[in-house]
Image (spheres, rainbow, N blue to C red):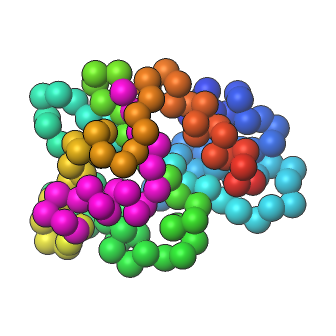
Amino acid sequence: MVQELQERLAPKCVVLDSKNVMDIVICPGASSSARVLFLEVKYLKDSSGRIGIGDWEGKGFQPEILRKRPTYFEAYMRWLIAAEDGWAVFVDNELIRKHASGGSFVPGKQNNIRESIFTEDAACVRTEDSLSRVVQWIEESV
């Protein structure tokens, strides 16, 4: 996905693929915008039945963002969640929080997103069409 994004957005944006902060970091290229966009990508396998966030102790950058709600990440972070059955949703942090297993993301335990995210609130698209949604959000944001 990183390569496809880079091809569709160059030279307007630079897509970084380091996993130290987020799955994908998008930086404006020649634009005067100072915005950096963050995209977290998750994949639901039928065999696992869950979409995990952070590590087994609830630690990690994403759970902390979801708990503390920093304004910048609320505005410039999105989630692309794809399921093995070929459907995907592209959502913001608020919808991720709404579909937290147990109602919230808490330290000290494995945190998960409920599968209901595919059937409530978010508009599902075929996985192959999800990249267009991501590109549209990026182009509108930089």
x and y, in percent, of residue 64 in the image: 35, 71
Find the magenta span and give its range: 87-104
x and y, in percent, of residue 11 in the image: 82, 38
Q: Residue at x 37, y 57 (%)?
A: 95
Closer to the camera in the image, 26 or 73: 73
Determine which quarter of the picture holds residue 71. bottom right
Q: Residue at x 32, y 63 (%)?
A: 97
Residue 33, above or below 88? below
Residue 23, above or below 60? above
Q: Residue at x 13, y 63 (%)?
A: 102
Q: Is residue 133 left or right of residue 12?
A: left
Task: Say whether residue 61 is visible.
Answer: no
Determine which quarter of the picture holds residue 42. top left
Task: Say whether residue 126 is visible.
Answer: yes
Q: Is 115 in the magenta?
A: no
x and y, in percent, of residue 55 in the image: 22, 57
Q: Is residue 62 left or right of residue 99?
A: right
Residue 75, above or below 52? below
